[in-house]
Image: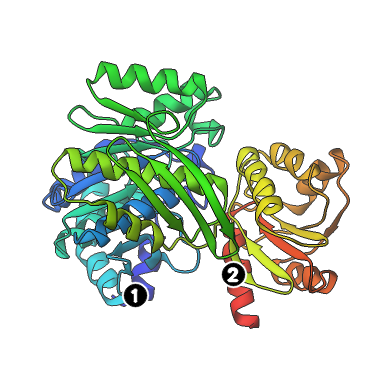
C-alpha cells in the first residue's frame, strides 16, 4: 500500500468531517477494541489532552513546542489539516512521512476489519482510525509525551482513551450543537469529559455558566483546576505584523514572552499553554522559564491570522463561529493598518451562519461569498440569504480561486484581504496563493 492508497483507505470510512454528524454513532468501545488489538499504543507515552471550542489547536501546538524545547521527544495530534493529512500527526514538529503513514495503514487494516466484522458497537470511523494510527506512530517513535487535540466534544471523542497528566479546556462557545447540546452548560459537560482523576485541569477564561460545570466536575473527580485569567494573567506589551510581546504571571514564575501568532485570543491560548506547562512541572516534567519562552517564540500554527502576502495584506483565519469572527474583526482593527478591506467568506453547512454574518456586519468591508470544494460547504445561496438579511452588500464567486482573483482586483496596495469562515476555505486560499506566487 503506497501513501495515496493508504489515504484513500482511511478516508473510505465514515468521516464526520465530510458528512452530517447525525449519521455517526459515537461509541468509545469500538476504539478501545481496536487499540487493544494493537497492544494499546495510547499508553506508551504521557499525555496532555486538550478540548474546547476555540483555540485548542493553537494551544496544543504551543504546549508541544514547549515540550520539544525542553528536550522531550513529543508527538502532536491535531485536526483538521490544511493542505496535507500528514499535518495531523507530528513528532518534534515534523509531519509523519508518507512511507510511515502507508506502513501503519497497512498494519492497522486487518485490525480495523476484525473490529468491524464483530460489529459490537458500530463500525470504526475515519477519525478513529487516524487516531489509532497516530498512537501507533508515537509508540514507534518512542515519544515521551503526546499532545492530543480532541476532534469533537470530549467525552465520546476517539482521543478520550488516555489517562492524561494534564487536561486542558480552552474557550467554550456554541458549536456542534447538534451533537453536544444547545446550552453552554451541556457543551461544557461534554468537553469536561476528558477530565480524569489523578490529572491537573487547566481552563481558559470561560463564561460563568461553563466555568460552573468545569468546577463541579473537577471537584467531583478531586482534580486541581487552574483558571487562566485569574490564577494566570498576562499583559500585552507590544505588537506588529511579525508577532507580539507580552508579560505573563503564572502560578510559579513570571515570564516575558514573544509570540509569532497575532490576536489577543492567541495571548489567551499562550497563557493556557504556559499554565499547562507549569502543571506538568508539578508532575515531575523538567520545564524551565527559558524553555517555555523558546517554545512560545518558536510555535508554528498556520491558518490563524496568517499573513500570506503584503501590498495588499492578504490574511487567512479559520474563524468559524460568531465569537471567533468577532475576535478576528477586533484583531484586524488592532494589528493592521489599511485603507479598505475585502472579506472572502465561505462556511460549512453545520455552522451558525447568522452569528458570523452578524459580526461581519459591523466590519466595513466588501464581502465576496464563495463555496469550497469540501462536501460540507454551505451553498452560496444560503449565504446570500443570510448576508442580505443582515443588510451586508456582497459579491458572489462560484469558487475560491475566482474569489481570490476578484478580491485582489478590488484591493489596492494599501488595502487588506481576509479569507475566513472555515478552515477548509483557508486551506484552498493558501493553496491558491502559493500556486499563484
Q: In which image quadrant can residue 400 be found? A: bottom right
Given residues 361 and 70, the one toward you in this image is: 70
Q: Is residue 170 left or right of residue 279?
A: right
Residue at the spot of label 2: 430
Q: Which mark is residue 283?
A: none
Q: In which quarter of the image is residue 428?
A: bottom right
Above or below residue 373? Residue 238 is above
Q: Distance between the residues labelled 2 and 1?
A: 23 Å
Give how far across and how far down residue 130 sits, in percent.
33, 56
Q: Residue at x 84, y 39 (%)?
A: 390
Question: As drawn, is 203 to the left or to the right of 184?
Answer: left
Tell me what residue is drawn at x 24 percent, y 20 percent: 221
Q: Quadrant of the C terminus?
A: bottom right
Q: Dot 1 corresponds to which residue?
A: 3
Residue drawn 65% across the image and 63% down it? 315
- Give the number of the mark in front: 2 or 1: 2
Along the viewing direction, whichever of 287 and 407 lies nearer the viewer: 287
Q: In which quarter of the image is the N terminus?
A: bottom left
Kindly indicate whether the residue at mark 1 contacts the one at mark 2 (C-beta within 8 angstroms).
no
Which structural element holds mark 2? Answer: helix
Residue 386 picture location, percent across and down: 80, 41
Amino acid at each position: 500500500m503506497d501513501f495515496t492508497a493508504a489515504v484513500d483507505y482511511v478516508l473510505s470510512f465514515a468521516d464526520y468531517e465530510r458528512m452530517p454528524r447525525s449519521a455517526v454513532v459515537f461509541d468509545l468501545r469500538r476504539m478501545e477494541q481496536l487499540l487493544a488489538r494493537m497492544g494499546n499504543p495510547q499508553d506508551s507515552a504521557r499525555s496532555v489532552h486538550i478540548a474546547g471550542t476555540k483555540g485548542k489547536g493553537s494551544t496544543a501546538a504551543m504546549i508541544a513546542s514547549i515540550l520539544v524545547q525542553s528536550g522531550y521527544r513529543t508527538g502532536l495530534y491535531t485536526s483538521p489539516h490544511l493542505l496535507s493529512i500528514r499535518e495531523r500527526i507530528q513528532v518534534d514538529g515534523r509531519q509523519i512521512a508518507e512511507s510511515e503513514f502507508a506502513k501503519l495503514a497497512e498494519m492497522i487494516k486487518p485490525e480495523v476489519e476484525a473490529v468491524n466484522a464483530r460489529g459490537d458497537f458500530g463500525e470504526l470511523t475515519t477519525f478513529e482510525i487516524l487516531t489509532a494510527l497516530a498512537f501507533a506512530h508515537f509508540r514507534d517513535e518512542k515519544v515521551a509525551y503526546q499532545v492530543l487535540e480532541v476532534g469533537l466534544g470530549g467525552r465520546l471523542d476517539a482521543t478520550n482513551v488516555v489517562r492524561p497528566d494534564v487536561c486542558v479546556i480552552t474557550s467554550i462557545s456554541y458549536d456542534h450543537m447538534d451533537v453536544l447540546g444547545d446550552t453552554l452548560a451541556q457543551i461544557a459537560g461534554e468537553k469536561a469529559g476528558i477530565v480524569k482523576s489523578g490529572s491537573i485541569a487547566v481552563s481558559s477564561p470561560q463564561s460563568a455558566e461553563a466555568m460552573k460545570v468545569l468546577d463541579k466536575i473537577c471537584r467531583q473527580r478531586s482534580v486541581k483546576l487552574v483558571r487562566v485569567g485569574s490564577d494566570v494573567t498576562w499583559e500585552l506589551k507590544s505588537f506588529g505584523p511579525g508577532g507580539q510581546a507580552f508579560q505573563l504571571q503564572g502560578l510559579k514564575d513570571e515570564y516575558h514572552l514573544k509570540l509569532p501568532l497575532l490576536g489577543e485570543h492567541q495571548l489567551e491560548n499562550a497563557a493556557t499553554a504556559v499554565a499547562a506547562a507549569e502543571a506538568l512541572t508539578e508532575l515531575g516534567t523538567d520545564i524551565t522559564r527559558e524553555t517555555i519562552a523558546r517554545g512560545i517564540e518558536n510555535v508554528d500554527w498556520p491558518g490563524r491570522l496568517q499573513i500570506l502576502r503584503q501590498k495588499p495584506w492578504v490574511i487567512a483565519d479559520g474563524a468559524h463561529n460568531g465569537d471567533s469572527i468577532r475576535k478576528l474583526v477586533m484583531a484586524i482593527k488592532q494589528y493592521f493598518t489599511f485603507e479598505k478591506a475585502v472579506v472572502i467568506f465561505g462556511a460549512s453547512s453545520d455552522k451558525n451562519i447568522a452569528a458570523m454574518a452578524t459580526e461581519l456586519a459591523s466590519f466595513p468591508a466588501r464581502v465576496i461569498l464563495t463555496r469550497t470544494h469540501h462536501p460540507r460547504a454551505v451553498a452560496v445561496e444560503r449565504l446570500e440569504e443570510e448576508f442580505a438579511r443582515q443588510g451586508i452588500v456582497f459579491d458572489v464567486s462560484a469558487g475560491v480561486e475566482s474569489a481570490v482573483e476578484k478580491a485582489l482586483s478590488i484591493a489596492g496596495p494599501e488595502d487588506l484581504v481576509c479569507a475566513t469562515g472555515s478552515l477548509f476555505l483557508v486551506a484552498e486560499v493558501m493553496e491558491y496563493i502559493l500556486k499563484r506566487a
